[in-house]
Image (cartoon, rainbow, N blue to C red):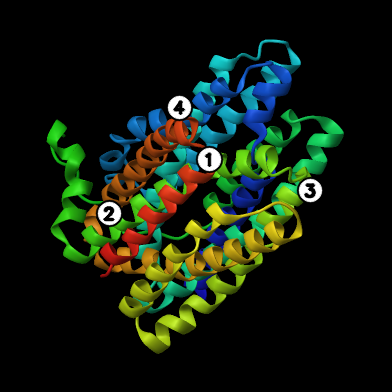
């Protein structure tokens, strides 16, 4: 058990340093595009969408590639690729070579490498930890992510104010380099990868989706989670327009209403294991999955001033709390029910579909908001999100 704890400690350290680096650099690329390259909002939206969509497509063949290789080797390689891609941005900036096309390419490479790293990390944890320890580990990772989301953006904003947006990209690049060092330091062996077929066929790229679709509970959770996340993320830019432009929220108020509720994520992640132990994983997934859908629709009713600030904080706190309870239990349930030789392919398929859904729904909801207004578009997304709570029961 001590060796398992030590090895997971290195995985946790790698995840923590990269998570803090990511949140420290959160929003840096749009700021660079606007402040350094002087592009308009349409190009900024295209930058975000391209990174998700094209990165997801590039990651499709990575599922089988990850499955048939040592998982720690893949994790180190993915970290090094992300670090190299990101460090190219400040280097190009210093020499005056930075372009919008480079930002797009870096976004795509980082998105694809992230999917590969997460798939390999999930497969590695399944082989490393007992089923009893998986939920503890996933809860710790979820707590780390929420703590990084509380601390990272304010520190990143201060760094951007003092040194410019490029410095946070450099910090993010260094975080992935440190993460690679942590993964490399794990030591010990790992279960051998799945036997590689003599020749991969194009149809083999769909193995991850076949694995999901063959399992009734995973299929329902997959559809509900992809739709929930896609609709929720699609409303983020619309909510920014509503709060900052239409309702006159100041930047510090906007930051407050999203940073403060992240404390609910810390609480939810810490309680997830206790809830699962007392009520069972299936019941927690049902209840938390339904409760998380009840919050977003209320954002359509936000008003200016203090009442609006309070409403957004309450809604976001409830949403984040329920999501933080749901996420580690889902991650554990998913790993327990995926065949050991298909974990990387299945997690890749899950991530690819999620990224494509976010990119597509963000574009659709942007058009909807242009036609009917951001408040109405947020209300429509909230109403559809309610339906995902009924379809995601394991």
The earlier-in-sequence mark between 2 and 1 is 2
Q: Which residue is mark 4?
A: 50
Q: Which residue is mark 2?
A: 223
Q: CA distance from mark 1 to mark 3?
A: 21 Å
Q: Which residue is mark 3?
A: 252
> Looking at this view, is 373 or 244 the one in front?
373
Q: CA distance from mark 1 to mark 4?
A: 22 Å
Residue at point 32%, 37% (across, down): 62
**Labelled pair 3, 2 in contact (Cβ < 8 Å):** no
Q: Residues within 10 Å of mark 2 (few under 14, many from 20)?
A: some
Q: Which residue is mark 1?
A: 374
Q: Is residue 289 visible?
A: yes
- Frontmost of labels 3 and 2 is 3
The earlier-in-sequence mark between 3 and 2 is 2
Left or right: 67 as drawn, with respect to 367: left
- Frontmost of labels 3 and 4 is 3
């Amino acid at each position: 058990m001590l060796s398992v704890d030590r090895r997971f400690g290195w995985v946790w350290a790698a995840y923590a340093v990269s998570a803090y680096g990511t949140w420290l650099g959160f929003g840096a690329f749009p700021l660079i595009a606007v402040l350094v390259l002087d592009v308009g909002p349409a190009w900024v939206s295209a930058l975000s969408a391209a990174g998700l969509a094209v990165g997801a497509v590039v990651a499709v063949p990575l599922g089988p590639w990850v499955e048939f290789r040592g998982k720690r080797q893949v994790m180190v390689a993915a970290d090094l690729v992300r670090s190299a891609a990101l460090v190219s941005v400040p280097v190009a900036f210093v020499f005056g070579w930075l372009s919008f096309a480079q930002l797009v390419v870096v976004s795509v490479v980082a998105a694809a490498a992230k999917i590969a790293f997460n798939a390999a990390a999930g497969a590695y944890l399944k082989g490393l930890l007992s089923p009893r320890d998986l939920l503890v580990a996933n809860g710790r990772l979820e707590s780390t992510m929420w703590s990084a989301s509380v601390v990272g953006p304010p520190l990143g904003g201060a760094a951007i104010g003092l040194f410019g947006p490029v410095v946070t990209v450099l910090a993010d690049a260094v975080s992935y380099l440190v993460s690679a060092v942590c993964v490399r330091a794990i030591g010990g062996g790992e279960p051998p990868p799945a036997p590689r077929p003599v020749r991969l066929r194009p149809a083999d790229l769909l193995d991850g989706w076949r694995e999901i679709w063959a399992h009734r509970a995973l299929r329902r959770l997959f559809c509900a989670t992809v739709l929930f996340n896609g609709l929720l993320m699609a409303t983020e830019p619309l909510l920014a327009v509503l709060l900052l432009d239409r309702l006159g929220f100041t930047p510090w108020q906007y930051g407050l209403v999203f940073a403060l509720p992240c404390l609910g994520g810390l609480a939810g992640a810490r309680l997830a294991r206790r809830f699962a132990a007392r009520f069972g994983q299936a019941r927690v997934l049902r209840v938390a999955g339904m409760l998380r859908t009840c919050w977003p629709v209320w954002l359509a009713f936000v008003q200016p001033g203090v009442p609006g600030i309070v409403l957004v904080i309450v809604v976001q706190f409830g949403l984040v709390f329920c999501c933080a309870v749901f996420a580690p239990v889902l991650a554990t349930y998913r790993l327990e029910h995926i065949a050991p030789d298909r974990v990387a392919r299945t997690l890749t398929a899950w991530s690819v579909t999620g990224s494509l859904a976010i990119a597509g729904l963000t574009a659709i909801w942007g058009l909807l908001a242009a036609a009917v207004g951001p408040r109405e578009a947020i209300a429509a997304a909230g109403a559809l999100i309610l339906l995902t709570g009924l379809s995601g029961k394991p």
